[in-house]
Image (tube, grey):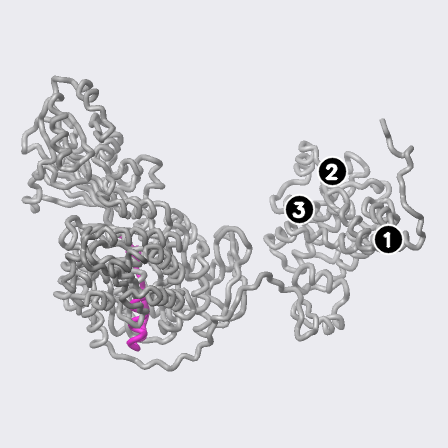
Amino acid sequence: MPRVKLYEHSAKTIISKALPLPYRGIRIDENTDLKKLVASLPKNKTYVVKVDQGVKKRMKNGLVVLNISPAEIPAALKKLKLKKFDNFLVEEFLPHKPNEEKYFSLERQRDGIVASVSDKGGIDIEDNPDSIKTFILEPKNYSALEKLTGLSPDMLQKIRQTFDELCFSFLEINPLVVKNETPYFLDLAATVDSAGEFFVSGTWGEKDIVAMALKTTEEKTVKILKDNSPAALSLAVINPNGSIFLLLSGGGASLVVADEVANLGAANELANYGEYSGNPSEEETYLYTLEIISLLKKSRAKRKILIIGGGVANFTDVRATFRGIIRALEKNKITLQKMSTKIFVRRGGPGQTEGLASMQKFLNDNNFDGGVYGPELPLQKIVELALC
Amino acid sequence: MLNIQQLRKLEPQIIALGNHRPILQSMLDFDFYCGRTEPTLKAIIGTGKKFEKFFFGKREILIPVYHDLSHDIKINATINGLINVNSGRRTLASMRAAISAYPNLKTAVLFAENVPEKHSLEMDKLAKTKNITITGPASVGILIPNHLKIGPIGGVDHRQLLSAKLFDTGATAVLCSSGGMSNEIINLLAHANIPLSFAVAFGGDRFPVLTPKEAFLAAENDPNTKQIVYFGELGGYDEYELAELLKKKIITKPVIAYIAGSVSAVFKEPPQFGHAKALAQRGAETAVAKAEALTDAGALVGKSFAQFLNLITKNIMTQKSPPQTQIDLSDRRASLFTCRISGDKNGSPTILGQELVAAVKTMSYSEMVIALLLGKKPKSKELAQFTDLALKLLIDHGPYVSGAVNTMITARAGKDLVSALCAGLLTIGDRFGGAINEAALNWFTAVNQKIAAANFVENFASAKKIIAGIGHKKYSSHQPDERVKLILEFAKKLKFHPHLDFALGVAKITLAKKANLILNVDGALAAVLLDLLQEKENYQKEELSELIASGFFNSLFILARSVGFAAHFLEQRRLDEGLFRLPEDSVNNG
């Protein structure tokens, strides 16, 4: 999953180090000793506490607590934890005037690193779209950028270098406040290209990346499976009590099938989205299928439909992947039968004749309702057959 | 700029960076079904073996594997296509090297996923400066029916190639962000009797090097293309560029499109779908918004995939293809061994492709020996002559040498011919008889690294190592080896003899130290044989290096001396002197 969010704490640490500027923000997670923390903070200063989990519009959603004393921090955290968050950031509060707030963002685009800046920064930046000016971040634009943001050419150059070399994709500082030539990044969000991790010599890694909100054990298991395989595997639960379960292959084909479920008005019944591709092994496909079946078994929906769908693969071995799927179905067949699960299959590619035949045999031998189709059936049609 | 018409006129000469057997085999099968007699895949850059076995039709062939890109300059200049199946991490580095190694490269496909965005953008710059079309990352490739297939596009199983009708040429271009869907669409067009003009899968990354815009322009400029079928996905803004091209009438050919991912709206937070780019963070990136933009610009955009299929069948003329006459390749099976030097043709033995009974009429024994050892017939008459000389000179050297002693002792112990011969042969190694190969390595290395004879000698002296090819127990500058004289005489038939010159230069220095440090028969044979192979047989450095690594130079000694050992065995049998026991006074028991 190439573009991933960094924790604000990690991103600020990296950017501050590059300038170089001191950074004294403190990351808080479930392991933090709050008493020690409060004791360690100077009493004469006030602080900001905020959720640090890659969430947008924190201020508007009440996920930031401003200007509190050290003693008030534990209570503020307690409140935020009630909103089901578990990772926070504590920083010194910086008093400033609203008109000091600037907007500064960078995005890697085809033509270069594009800077978007505005001297009307702050939480209402979206109300001032016309104030945002864009530049390619390169030396000839540094003086114009300095006028709008207060960041010196030297700082801009260092930020640019860090952004580029450390495989950042996106960086947004809003508001940015510059006082006496020192920049303060009040809020900062950053996205990095996960494919670049190998090339950044440990500057950022797994621990700095905001873990996706994986709510279910099935999603977590698939994530682990994916992390340990060259193949692509993904699973997102949409509705735990849905009735339509997707076991799809291919990034594009999985979208087509999922689109069709929505097109036919059954979006609210869709239990999950996900896909396997890049020729996973029989074993990986088996383990992946077990997770889909696990979701299916837990769902309280009355009817259960499993769609095993995919396009005509270029190089994924249909025979081997289907062997894995059938093993997982076989293992759970009694439960699946009890739930009157309907199984609809549409797939093509290398080894399709054998793969489809063994799937048909499994359905026949175990009296499952449904059908098995090859490339002769248009891809999206399997959804229509499954839903009628 | 991608120019399809130009690619149609160019005979593909493809190199693979890395080996992905099913993909490369499918490219060979494609070539075979195109009616080519030679595969377009010329070599693999990889590790391990020197060759990889593939099928060309039902016949097994060997594709050379080079360990580095600069291996063969002659091949490098002809390469115009490339498939890169290295990992995402290795993709940029290997492409940089390839682009400088292959000056005539036109089309490259990057198969790996997980190429950093930064690397894709760098390759984008390289592609533009060098005018190379790079498809990918995460691309299944580019296809021109009956002409070019780079990548798994259209399938990897030979049956897929036939059922997808990749050999019928038509008028519909398939441009697709998704690899799997490109094949799906190629197949559904095949079922609907709509043959292709060409097909490209850009790959689902954020920054594909070949952009949808460039592919659309290629389709517009291609005289064979009459309409474009496009499959896009949510995420990114490519479709707005396409809409601009349509509005400005830069693209005039009909476009039928589907933008997948409207399901994204079902989620509370926009999720990351299968492909890296498939994430709609802003409204304009959603499938629905992009589909609307294309519709407004005049494209026929399916609101659902079913509607997209309807648009295709309603708007594109079908073209009946001739019935398939291609042969089925299902029953081919990979061999366990490869042998190209000899065989059996209808009960008659063959060597090097010729019937043995015919070969004996035209070839001398020495010529047959050297031809089999080298795996090809010699070009010059000198090589056979020299082989003849070597075999004669090495035939025997009296009963005193290790191998002969072993043979005789074994014979006297009452063992059979094969046992006695093996006992003799087992003594051949670095110290006895095996010095020819090591001498060849010495001369070859020094000549290639341009080491001066004096330095060469000094290196051995300081390492306290003896120089193979130099020195003899018996002969010296006072009592020259007549065999060496004959070998040196033979060298006069050559214009150049760098290896011999070097060896003699070494001997000149060593003789100044000690009179018996002459160029010996092993050293002389190795030097002249190297010179001969280079001058008369046109052997390149790499080939000579391989011969040395395989132990070829010792094979002549082993062959020649086997005669001597067998003779010693037979003589011992004739004399029947009884079991040999070492006299006790010849052993030092202290």
The Cα atoms of the two marked residues, 1 and 2, are separated by 41 Å
Estimate the x, y position of residue B310 in percent, counting from the top left.
20, 73
Q: Secondary structure at mark 1?
A: helix
Estimate the x, y position of residue B67 in percent, counting from the top left.
51, 51
Crowding around mark 3 (Cα neighbors within 10 Å: few <14, some 14 to 19, many 20+) is: many
Is the residue under label 3 in contact with that under label 1 (CB below 8 Å)?
no
Q: Of circles 1 and 2, which is in front?
A: 1
Q: Is residue B502 positioned above or below A122 on the image?
A: below
The disc at residue B569 is 1
The disc at residue B509 is 2
Estimate the x, y position of residue B10 in percent, counting from the top left.
41, 68
The Cα atoms of the two marked residues, 3 and 2, are separated by 19 Å
Asked whether residue B207 appears in the rendered view, the answer is no
Q: At label 3, which amino acid type do we have? A: Leu
Pinpoint the chain carrying mark 1. B
Q: At label 2, which amino acid type do we have? A: Ile
Quarter of the image holding residue B289? bottom left
Query: Which residue range is magenta in the image?
Result: B183-209
Q: Are marks 1 and 2 on the same chain?
A: yes
In this rendered view, identify the residue nearer to me: B63 or B253. B63
Pinpoint the chain carrying mark 2. B
Whether residue A193 is in magenta: the answer is no
- Residue annotated with mark 3: B441
Whether residue B205 is in magenta: the answer is yes
Estimate the x, y position of residue B127 in percent, counting from the top left.
34, 55
Q: At label 1, which amino acid type do we have? A: Phe
The Cα atoms of the two marked residues, 1 and 3, are separated by 33 Å
